[in-house]
Amino acid sequence: METTLRQLLTAVGEPLVELLVAPTGLDMPVTGLAIVDPDDGPDEHPGHLVLVIGARGRDALRTVRTVARRGAAAVAVKSGETGTAELRAAAEEAGVALLTVRPEVRWERLESLARAVLDEDGALDDDSPGDLFSLAQTIGLLTGGIVSIEDTASRVLAYSRSDSDAAQVDELRRLSILGWQGPSDHLRLLREWGVFDRLRAGEDVVRVDERPELGIRRRLAVGIHAGQRSLGTIWVQEGAAPFSERAEDVLLGAARVAAGHLIRQRGHRVSGARWSHDLVTGLLDGRANAELVAATFGLDVHASALVVAFAVRAVGAEQELSLAELAEVVSVHAAGYRRAALTAALGARVYAVLPDVPRDRAEPALVAMCAEVAERIASRTGSRVQAGVGSAVDGLVAVAGSRGEADRVLDAMDADRSVAVFGDLRAEVLLHRTLELLDAHPDLQDPAVARLVDYDRKHGTELVGSVVAWLDALGDVRAAAAGLTVHPNTLRYRVRRAVAVGGLDLDDPRARLMHHLQLLAAVRSDKPSGSSSSA
């Protein structure tokens, strides 16, 4: 997967760089990074982001034009006292995107962050949870705060954009991002207050009170751990609005997800990430060895587990929701529910494998977690997401079976539900599966039903729906008529007419059952994708 200029700016952007012009748009791919000094000889830069060092403002004009001719996708120049308008005009004429870099930003800092985004973006498939930058952005959206992720030396590894809350950014965050790590005076105070000791001690979320005189706004922080080993910290600064109600729960899950990112980064970044993703998807479709998966992720291969499937049913008008964004939100909430949760996208759905769950029932906390994912997505993007919960199975070797149930729950759900559990929807799931089998075997088609469906289509009548309503009501004409909002005599006439047109045999119990199933299949095939049939 190639990184686009838009993705790069979303991750690195403010406060390090500002986009001045993008003549060919923001969706152009950025294939690499180059550092150029005006005294360097000419070189080719196909699709690269070029950092121009050693020249500012108007002095960088010649270099900007040169790297543009050499194929650069974007060029970054430190702003000077003059020449901004000339640089903009030159970039527009040359067809290259122009980024200005604040004077106090260190080039090695910008290079490190940009390379992290460009390297990490290709590490996972398109539909996998993204890198630390996208995780930081997700945490910010779910907590309502301004996020930075730091290593154990307080070096900033990634951060969320804070355009809408720019006026609320405090000195601690501003100096941390511009200087690549927390300022020494602020870090000393945090150590004196015991904040770092508490973060290293465990998973508890630590609150840091506002200190206006020190330029510190209210914060939440959580340590990132791998077993007893500390890997870093997630900091969330309060913005213009208070933190969300469940901000601390979000942080707990986010820390567990961040641990996986950091462990992969310390190993073989690309192959390790692909390997992990392939193992989870292989577990979901029954291809992966369960014992290998258990050993890789530190799970008990014999412990109970279940799968939750998430699907986007409608895309909101406010913001398009990608599968990768959904996967990121699911991964944070799933890890908050179960530390060892595994998340992956497969096809058009996102799946969470949840180990060590009760075998006999779905916990209320699990249903609440799924509902919160749907609610968060809806409030943030306007998109509608549904979750189907499979049954708990005995061990990882049977996870594919739970995944199949979760898929069938999604397929059978009513449009107005956000979460459904297999045990509560068993009849609907079995009916849905039966109707699928009928659809797949035309040789089982009931000729009486086929004649009736064809008659409705040719004459614009509603005989099929009327008979289905009558059968659903077990022959209670008044109840069925009320559901259709027609007079009982009208319904009686339609049923008699259907018998005459199609040759239905409604007196024989077995024939009536087959007519009912075939009619339901006919009604189902006429409904929009994603709606469910009703018995």
Image (tube, rainbow, N blue to C red):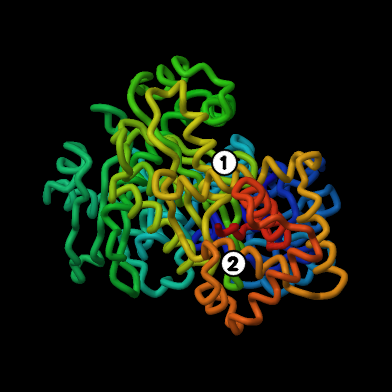
Tag on residue 232?
A: none
Q: Amino acid at mark 1?
A: Ala
Vertical relation: 395 (above or below) 444: above
Vertical relation: 316 (above or below) 206: below
Q: Quadrant of the N terminus?
A: top right
SS of the residue under disc 1: strand
**Which is more N-terminal, label 1 or label 2?**
1
Label 2 – label 1 distance at C-alpha: 42 Å
Residue plotted at (78% across, 58% down) = 503
The quadrant in which residue 460 appears is bottom right
Q: Amino acid at mark 2?
A: Trp
Q: Residues within 10 Å of mark 2 (few under 14, many from 20)?
A: many
Measured from the top left, where is residue 234 in percent x and y? 33, 48
| Residue that numbered label 1 is attached to | 345
Residue plotted at (77% across, 50% down) = 72
| Residue that numbered label 2 is attached to | 470
- Between 210 and 72, which is closer to the camera in this rendering? 210
Vertical relation: 175 (above or below) 481: above
Judged by depth in the image, the label closer to the viewer, 2 or 1, is 2
Instruction: Say whether residue 81 is left or right of residue 494.
Output: left
Measured from the top left, where is residue 140 in percent x and y? 40, 59
Measured from the top left, where is residue 65 in percent x and y? 81, 58
